[in-house]
Amino acid sequence: MSTYTLRLSEPERARYRMMAQSARQAEADLWRAAGIVEGAHVADVGCGPGAVLALIAEDVGPSGYVTGVDSDAEAVAAAQSEIVSTGLRNAAVRVGTAQATGLEPASLDVAVLRHVLAHNGGIEHEIVGHLATLVRPGGAVYLVDVDLTATRLRPVPPELADLVEAYVGFHRHLGNDPQVGLRLADLATDVGLVIEDFRGWYTIMEVPPGLRPPAWAARDAMVDSGVISRADVERWGSALQRLDDEPQRPRMFAAMFAAVCRRPDS
């Protein structure tokens, strides 16, 4: 059984792939600065269904290697399928947690952690501290996360006005920090890493018909937690379906943060 609150449906996997391509374009210089280059050995921790992992494998080339790690067996199976379908020979995936990956200490050039800390409130320091042990001296930990409270959809149908707010409330209910992106530099320096770059930006994208936000993928978990009701799900589902037919596509604005964090040489 999957432990994901974001149910891995095919539309959700399509969202992962689209966001991965957007990330690679927006963060190209940061990827290079972190060391995601030809020949690098990289771990994608919290790799989910493998969309970013596949792109990293392309960038490090046949002389490099990427290991994906995820705590969810269904996500690992999806990532393995992504590796096979793209014909990659320099990537593998395994089950493990972000704070206990099972990877060898000081074995990596780069440890990547994307959108994981926002789902692991209370153990953020433990996770970043573990990643710092995985990279060799001079290697980098590359962190990416969000400020969910700053997410916007414009124009937004009235029936969807509370969707993001409910999702933020759900994360707080779980003990997560929906603004953890603001803390990336602090988390890294607390475990002895040196900040080389820390920046934020808005990802702005036109939402294509059929695409669903993370809150929709988490709807069952949100109902089970008591944060929303089945009536909310029905209301949002109908509004999203109507939105698919609108000729004017809405735009999503998502606040993103990234930090390139270097392990000192000595």
Image: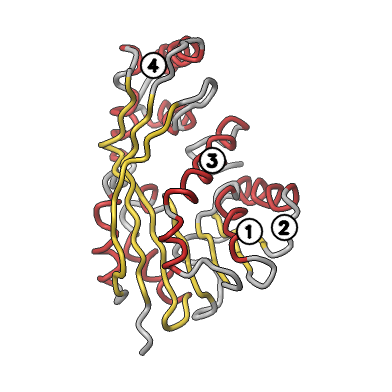
Distance from disc 4 to disc 3, alpha carbons, whole Å, reads 24 Å
12 and 176: which is toward the camera:
12
Q: Are marks 1 and 4 in contact (CB under 8 Å)?
A: no
Residue at image point 67% right, 62% down: 91
Using residue 66 as the reference point, say whether residue 173 is left or right of it.
Answer: left
Q: In the rendered structure, which disc, 2 or 1, sits on the residue that comes first in sequence?
A: 1
Q: Are marks 4 and 3 in contact (CB under 8 Å)?
A: no
**Mark 2 is on which residue type?**
Leu
* As drawn, 223 above or below 147: above
Q: In the rendered structure, which disc, 2 or 4, sits on the residue that comes first in sequence?
A: 2
Dot 4 corresponds to which residue?
Answer: 232
Q: Position of residue 225 (x, y in %)?
A: 38, 32
Q: In the rendered structure, which disc, 3 or 2, sits on the residue that comes first in sequence?
A: 3
SS type, badge 1: helix
Residue at image point 48% right, 70% down: 35
Q: Are marks 2 and 1 in contact (CB under 8 Å)?
A: yes
Split into 4 quadrants, where in the image is the C terminus?
bottom left
Dot 3 corresponds to which residue?
Answer: 16
Q: Residues within 10 Å of mark 1 (few under 14, many from 20)?
A: many
Residue at image point 49% right, 51% down: 24
